[in-house]
Image (cartoon, rainbow, N blue to C red):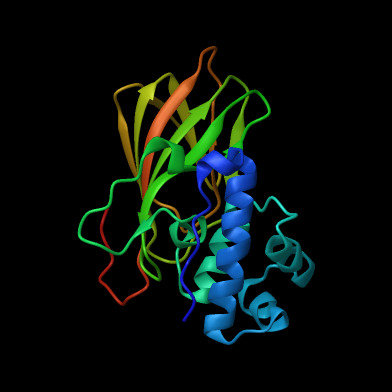
Amino acid sequence: MEKKVNIPTATVDDVERVSATVSQNLKIFRRDSGFSLDELSRRSGVSKGMLVEIEKGTANPSIATLCRAATALGVSVADFVGVASSVPVRIVPPEDASTLWRGPNGGSATLLVGTNGPDEIELWRWSMFPGEMFESPGHSPGTLELLNVEVGELTFRLEETEQAVRAGSSVLARTESPHAYLNRGECELRFVMAVAELQRPRSRIGL
């Protein structure tokens, strides 16, 4: 089996580094799984054209696209971008964290660290400026998100329901349905988020 690749930050800027790492690892995981591009497209719901562009390193896939491809391959998004840990302790320095979303006003979503797949536990740091919004499709059944708002006010939307979350407050949400994060305030919003998407059979966790 080929070894996963991490592209050193010092050689390319952040966007190019993430694109190159995802390109290399998608090809490796797909070949290890024995999937053709057509089969991976069928299993993931990601178009074959997009998969080709990702493997060529010419696409900038969305977080949702990476999630669908990772689930189909039995890995995690953290595996794709090279911040997953398979050892008892791994330190991920800030320059190795992967920014996977950038808002039109300067916001960002950075995957700081995560587990190897197929079970996924990820830690994210988000920054959103006034007027920015990120929409996400529903995740697999039982997925939980835990958020803590550090600065500003988060508007958290789950399906058609919205709730305001002030600085210092936290959220526990089952995100099987479409959801969104919005900054409707007048200052920067910052929050940290943990995502747990576990594939093995388990009892449902009550909220």
Q: Is residue 77 left or right of residue 49?
A: left
174 up-or-down from 163: above or below? below
Q: Position of residue 69 (x, y in %)?
A: 58, 67
Among all residues in the image, which is located at the extreme right? 49
Viewer-proximal residue, 8 or 108? 8
Q: Is residue 101 above or below residue 122?
A: above
Q: Position of residue 4 (x, y in %)?
A: 47, 67
List the single residue furthest toward the front: 11
Q: Residue at x 64, y 45 (%)?
A: 16
The furthest residue to the bottom: 34
Dividing the picture into quadrants, the one containing residue 66 is bottom right
In the displayed structure image, the side of residue 37 where residue 34 appears, left or right:
left
Q: Considering depth in this image, is 160 or 55 the residue closer to the camera?
A: 55
Q: Nearer the viewer, residue 3 or 99?
A: 3
Residue at image x 49%, y 76%? 2
Horizontal side, residue 23 vs residue 91: left or right: right
Relative to 65, say whether 159 is above or below.
Answer: above
The x and y percentages for residue 120 are 38, 62
Can residue 100 be seen in this snapshot?
Answer: no
Residue 45 horizontal side relative to residue 7, left or right: right
Determine the residue located farthest toward the left in the rendered image: 88
Q: How many marks?
A: 0
Residue 35 placement (x, y as % from top left) = 62, 84
Whether residue 102 can be seen here: yes
Q: Residue at x 50, y 70 (%)?
A: 71
Q: Which quarter of the picture shows residue 129?
A: top right
Q: What residue do we see at 54% from left, 60% from top?
A: 67
Dividing the picture into quadrants, the one containing residue 168 is top left
Q: Foreground residue, 185 or 158?
A: 185
Above/below status of 110 relative to 48: above
